[in-house]
Amino acid sequence: MSPYPFRRLQGELAELINSLPAETRLPSEPILAKRMGVSRATLREAMRSFEGQGMIRRRQGVGTFVAAKVPVIDTGLEVLESIETIAQRSGLTVKMGELKVMHIATDENLAKVLKLEIGADLTRVERIIFTDFRPIAFLVDTLPMDILRVDEIQPSFSGSVLDLLLRRGDPKLTQSRTEIKAIGATPEVARALQIQRDDVLLHFAADLYSEDGQVVDHSYSYFLPGYFRFHVVRRVG
């Protein structure tokens, strides 16, 4: 199918979904595919996109339902802040889900980023952020062991490595360089966010710097597009 008909299909589906009250059950896939004039495979691909945006919910063995309107985390990118801080300022509630803290060894790629020898000790922190019982972000931070030890992650950990480092005050943090792009979800990330493989996500790859120019945290963040709205305020040059 060419891009234009698929975009038309997405537009028609979006119009249908937005016209219905929350918790309305959508027609079955065969009926909806026939109505839209597309194959079930094409319809399923489009529906996956809306599920990833939080616009619909699939209930195994029951059907597909219009989801309630979700709060959107809307923020600028001029100042580095954690999801928890942004959500609190916006009056939204987010919670940390599954947490994994592990010791790993530096591989060739991380050695270049963190300027460490291959095999050096690192701490990796992986966690899932939820809102309204729905996973909306998957975060992975990798830090040198002398910056953050595995045993420093306490049961009271809020989910933000940035906030933890800021509270501690050492090392002093100065800036972050972040690459932003859209990617398809890998199997690991898809499982974490309860979406389908290759569903589109916002991906942030960031290096956090201390005042001496050392990268102290190399992180990957995966966001469901329907729950986040990022913007940048730029002055005219």
Image (cartoon, grey):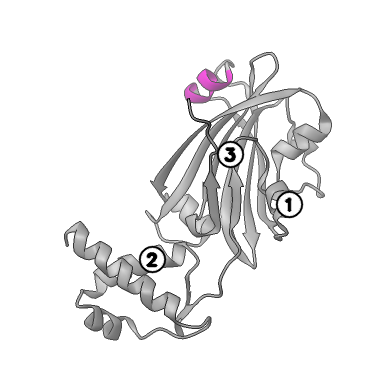
Amino acid on which the number 3 mark rests in the picture: Leu
Q: Secondary structure at mark 2?
A: helix
Q: Residues within 10 Å of mark 1 (few under 14, many from 20)?
A: few
Task: Report the residue marked by disc 1.
Answer: 89
Q: Nearer the viewer, residue 27 or 198?
A: 27
State the residue at coordinates (77%, 33%).
166
> The magenta stretch spans which residues?
108-114
Disc 1 marks a residue whose amino acid type is Arg
Q: Which residue is tagged 3?
A: 77
Taking the magenta stretch, the answer to whether it contains residue 190 is no
Numbered label attached to residue 189 = none
| Front one among 16 and 46 | 16
Q: CA distance from mark 1 to mark 3?
A: 15 Å
- In front of the other: 169 or 14: 14
Within the image, what quadrant is residue 103 found in? top right
Q: Earlier in the sequence, mark 2 or mark 1?
A: 2
Visible in this render: residue 146? no
- Figure check: 127 above or below 11: above
Task: From the top left corner, tell me how far across and down residue 14 is, in percent.
Answer: 38, 71
Q: Write down the quadrant of residue 146 in the picture.
A: top right
Q: Report x, y in % for residue 150.
A: 73, 36
Q: Is residue 163 above or below residue 66?
A: above
Q: Which quadrant would the N terminus be assigned to in this image?
A: bottom left
Residue type at mark 2 is Arg
Query: Where's residue 31, x and y in %?
Result: 28, 86
The residue carrying mark 2 is 48
CB atoms of marks 2 and 3 within 8 Å = no
Left or right, 18 with respect to 169, comes to left
Determine the secondary structure under disc 1: helix
Mark found first going from the N terminus, 2 or 3: 2
61 sits to left or right of 171: left
